[in-house]
Image (cartoon, rainbow, N blue to C red):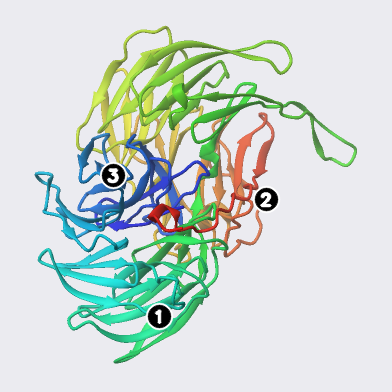
Amino acid sequence: MAWLATGAIEPSTVCVRSQPRTTAPHAPEITHYSSDDVIEQYNVLCGWLCVHEKVICPDNGGIESVCFVGDRILCTHLNGSVTIADPHSDSIRRVQICPSPLWSSCAIDATHAAFVSHSASLFILELNDYTVSTPLSLGIDQRLFSVCSQKDVISIGAMDSVFIVKNNAVARKMVVPRKEKRLPTIVWTTCFFNETIVASGDSRGVISFWNFNNGALLASLESHQSDILCLVMCEDRLHAAGVDPRIMSIKRIAANDFRIVQKRNGPVRDVRAMARFDDKIYAAGEDHSIFVAKDGCQVLMNQWNKLLTFGGPLVMSRGHCFVDLWTNGTSEQSNCKGAVVVKRQPVYLARVYCPEKKTLVTCDLSSDGKILALSSNESTTVYQLNMKGEGKLSLRNKLRTKPASAVKIHGECVLMATGDFEIWVASVKGEEPQLVLEQPGCGGVSQLVVSECGKFAAVITTRLQVFVIDLKSKESRLLRVSLPIDVAFTDGESLFVLCATAGFGEPSAAAKVLHEFPKNGGPSRRSASTVDLFGAPGYRAVSITPGPGDQLVVVASDGQWVLIDKTRSSVQGPIAPPSRRPSAAVPSTLHFRSRKRVCACRLQASEPTTAPFKLKKFGQQ
């Protein structure tokens, strides 16, 4: 299950996930709710791609809603408390609001937030001094389900009614009719349409438009076949979805005439959250994927290759609180038809959990497959891996130290990024970590790579900056690039930075997306557009993978890829006409199986467990 919210801070996305992993999308950020208390933050500034930035662990019980208040992330919990997190550091603060669950939240302005509780009360929190206003009770027999605000006006969705609150007092109560006499109508969501009109979506599948100044019902529109769970405004249109997952766009044609002007199909299960950014709608819920709607509706792309790490004879895949280890298969041979056959298929070895099964924040596997690092919100643990015969693996705990937002193993050292741009290095022999570099104000580190020689590191921060760090002199250099989404050192003398293009339109042939720098971070050597790389317009590059012999593979959103050789003059790959819409069912990952072959893997996500939408959590049976 998921809630989405938008905010006006640095460009990225936030989402909260639960045990059955769901993801969901700050003016350029979006937030996504679930029952497990974890927030995942993604960058969605380019619109069509989400790039993972960090994991925030409130460690405060179940999360019921998430929103952005100014430049902070705020989430509510079942224990009646609120967690306030910084998207660019590991700062977390907890404030107790009341003893009962807080079901919904919204930002009033950059320093105030509103909440509704299970005790049918409205609370307002001031974020500068963390004071809570006197609660406003809306009736002991009421149930409150949603809240939204417009300046000093707050709208609350309740059972059989919509409340309008001004100056901490009820100004209006609009009664919503019942479809059946014994079945109350639940107003799951409300949204301000303009300066005088508020819209409500309810359990009948009906959207009602109210004049909140006098309480008059202007119009009712039966837009869905079941509960409407979320409403959002974008480009003078109201967008609605819910248990009926179709995204309906409603426009005001005349004074009291509201009509459905567009229907979007994309999600196939409950849509439980929607958010708007840059004239785009992001929707999420029971489906695995987040959907983004502009003219049509498509799956928000992800960098699937970041979930796999290859080291020596092992392959590591990342899970919620664990990693799975596999053998990488052995040798290859060609048959008479020229087909390549793997002599020995990968074999599943083990599942390694974080200590106490805490949420996995980041992980890495050494290039020789002998050292494994797992970092949770509480600690970073380093293991030595030993292969014992066929299909047997043993682990030995070598180091336990501070938690990190990114880790990278090189030789006998583990490089870690923590807080607001702090780089540490620790020895796997158990020595205390040493501070390499500290640059407050640059943001947390979302990606960390180390050169083959071990002298340089490169990072991408949550503020969308790329730094190259000289680990010996402990100095950093900022690279001038726009919208970086991936970074990689080759085994030669090069550092590559992949950038994204904003918007859904076809990338310009003149827009450079791949930049090559010397590994010490000097001036750019050369740049290339997607047309230079793929030989035709319409492609979007999503990730890069370094290979042997100073080579680089660039992967496109539709699974196509090209190999750039060490001379940078030859581009090779299975070029095919670009697909206008990436396939959500077969996300592509890519790696080098040997010094001569590239292996592209098509992944199929398992079907999520479908939990029917229930009223239990709100005290309804």
* Circle 1 or circle 3, nearest the eye: 1
The residue at 43%/32% (across/down) is: 359
101 displayed left or right of 229: left
Q: Residues within 10 Å of mark 2 (few under 14, many from 20)?
A: few
Rendered location of residue 55, percent (x, y): 38, 38
Which residue occupies the extreme bottom position in the image? 254
Measure the C-alpha gap from mark 2 to mark 3: 35 Å
Measure the C-alpha gap from mark 2 to mark 1: 44 Å
- In primary-sequence order, the first of circles 2 and 1 is 1
Circle on res. 463: 3
Mark 2 and 3 residues: CB-CB less than 8 Å, in contact?
Answer: no
Rendered location of residue 61, percent (x, y): 36, 38
Residue 398, compared with residue 461, is above or below; it is above
Circle on res. 574: 2
Rendered location of residue 409, percent (x, y): 45, 21
Measure the C-alpha gap from mark 1 to mark 3: 35 Å
Residue 209, compared with residue 456, is above or below; it is below
Does residue 158 appear in this view?
Answer: yes
Read off the residue under disc 1.
Answer: 250
Rendered location of residue 467, percent (x, y): 31, 35
Element type where label 1 sits in the image: strand
- In primary-sequence order, the first of circles 1 and 3 is 1
